[in-house]
């Protein structure tokens, strides 16, 4: 008979965004397996299930906003929220978990020093799932677009100081790098999981290289993301158009917004570009030939849009996994992406094309080639089925690191 475990799962959000959905699905799986879990978060909680055991770390004004101000002025992301984290750690001691599962610990809600002091003191086993590169850099969460390699030897004079988590005044990259290195290394029982082989390879070149690293890809819920009959084209009068779709929670040139802008002018009238998640302030700068839709966390609505699309286009160069690519495939939509970061790991000839460059000429050519292949929806769905929910992998890992 297996012994039940208590797991504290910590992430910036619950239900909101890709990591928020991932941690909530994991929480449900833990509880369904007869284990016990506590969800701790600092920003958004979009789950309206009052039965879930959750605790918020701080609040918007006194902690998140002030932590954000520290970041904006002094580049101190991860080192604010002192009293909020103190209060949270008292609750964590009361809960007394057998294991701590970290996800995104940046986002202006948590004091990393206090958290890792607690981890060293209690010697709790830790699994840290990395969704980006922030844990081993002096500032940024991604560096592919900037082509920066300083994180391998020591960050300084950050060329991305004004990129998330943006600092408008001081450059704390050297200090942050050394402090993170001191805090995050030398933990006796810490296992890192990454969501892609690409991210694993990056970790193994960083100061976190001492830890065992296991790849557990993000997963897809095929009951939520599947081909769904819809009237999307009819609603927007696009019955005679081929839809080129892009989806992102935040849009900027790193996500390929400029590329979509160029494609809108280069593709003929038989195509319609649809972008989901563009901020209101960005819309006035976009081509009138682009249909802009607001961000949605409603999975069925999103699945209908994916289903209506003829081609999904992922032009981001900073994907540590590419969850939107997987969601599109699960809905039967072929994908054009690029060769940077983890993008190629989700695509083969059966379900899409990896463009050799991130420019409108390369993507235009890839779109035409994809149409010539006439890829069947079943091929895309079959690819997505390789990434069905992997909660059991985590549950098995929990027992391995505890017992």
Image (cartoon, rainbow, N blue to C red):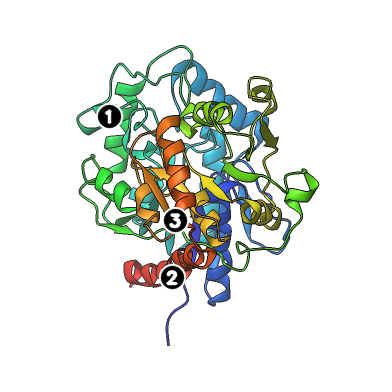
Q: Which residue is mark 2?
A: 395
> Which element is circle 3 on?
helix
| Residue sitting at x 63%, y 56% | 307
**Nearer the observer, 265 or 7:** 265
Q: Is disc 2 surrounded by few (<14), some (14 to 19) or many (20+) residues within 10 Å?
A: some
> Which element is circle 1 on?
helix
Between the residue at mark 2 and the residue at mark 1, the CA separation in whole angstroms equals 33 Å
Q: Position of residue 247 (x, y in %)?
A: 58, 42
Nearer the N terminus, badge 3 or badge 2?
Answer: 3
Instruction: From the image, state whether disc 3 or disc 2 is nearer to you.
Output: 3
Q: Position of residue 340 (x, y in %)?
A: 34, 40
Q: From this viewpoint, is residue 239 visible? A: yes
Residue extending furthest toward the bottom: 1
Residue extending furthest toward the right: 235
| Residue sitting at x 68%, y 26% | 288
Residue 252 is marked as none
As drawn, 61 above or below 243: above
**Nearer the observer, 283 or 24:** 283
Q: Which residue is mark 3?
A: 373
If the image is split into quadrants, where does the C terminus sit? bottom left
Q: Is disc 3 surrounded by few (<14), some (14 to 19) or many (20+) residues within 10 Å?
A: few
Q: Which residue is mark 1?
A: 178
Nearer the N terminus, badge 2 or badge 1?
Answer: 1
């Amino acid at each position: 008979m297996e012994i039940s475990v208590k797991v504290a799962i910590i992430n910036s959000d619950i239900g909101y965004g890709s990591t928020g959905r991932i941690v909530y699905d994991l929480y449900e799986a833990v509880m369904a397996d007869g284990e016990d879990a506590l969800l701790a978060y600092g920003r958004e909680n979009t789950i309206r299930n009052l039965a879930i055991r959750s605790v918020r770390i701080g609040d918007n004004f006194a902690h998140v906003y002030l932590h954000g101000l520290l970041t904006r002025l002094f580049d101190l992301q991860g080192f604010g929220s002192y009293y909020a984290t103190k209060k949270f750690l008292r609750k964590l001691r009361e809960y007394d978990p057998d294991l701590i599962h970290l996800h995104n610990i940046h986002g202006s809600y948590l004091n990393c020093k206090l958290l890792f002091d607690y981890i060293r003191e209690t010697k709790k086993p830790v699994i840290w799932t990395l969704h980006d590169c922030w844990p081993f850099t002096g500032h940024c969460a991604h560096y592919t677009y900037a082509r920066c390699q300083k994180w391998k030897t020591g960050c300084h004079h950050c060329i991305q100081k004004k990129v998330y988590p943006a600092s408008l005044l001081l450059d704390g990259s050297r200090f942050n790098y050394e402090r993170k290195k001191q805090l995050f290394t030398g933990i006796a029982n810490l296992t890192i999981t990454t969501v892609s082989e690409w991210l694993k390879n990056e970790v193994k070149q960083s100061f976190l290289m001492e830890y065992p690293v296991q790849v557990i890809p993000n997963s897809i819920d095929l009951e939520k993301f599947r081909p769904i009959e819809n009237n999307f084209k009819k609603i927007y009068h696009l019955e005679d158009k081929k839809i080129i779709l892009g989806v992102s929670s935040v849009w900027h040139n790193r996500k390929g917004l400029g590329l979509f802008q160029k494609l809108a002018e280069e593709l003929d009238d038989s195509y319609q570009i649809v972008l989901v998640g563009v901020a209101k302030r960005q819309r006035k700068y976009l081509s009138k030939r682009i249909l802009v839709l607001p961000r949605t966390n409603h999975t069925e609505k999103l699945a209908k849009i994916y289903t209506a699309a003829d081609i999904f286009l992922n032009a981001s160069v900073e994907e540590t996994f590419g969850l939107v690519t997987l969601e599109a495939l699960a809905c039967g939509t072929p994908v054009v992406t690029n060769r940077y970061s983890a993008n190629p790991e989700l695509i083969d000839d059966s379900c899409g094309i990896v463009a050799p460059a991130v420019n409108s000429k390369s993507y235009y050519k890839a779109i035409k080639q994809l149409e010539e292949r006439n890829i069947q929806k079943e091929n895309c769905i079959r690819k997505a089925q390789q990434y069905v929910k992997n909660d059991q992998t985590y549950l098995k890992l929990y027992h391995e690191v505890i017992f």
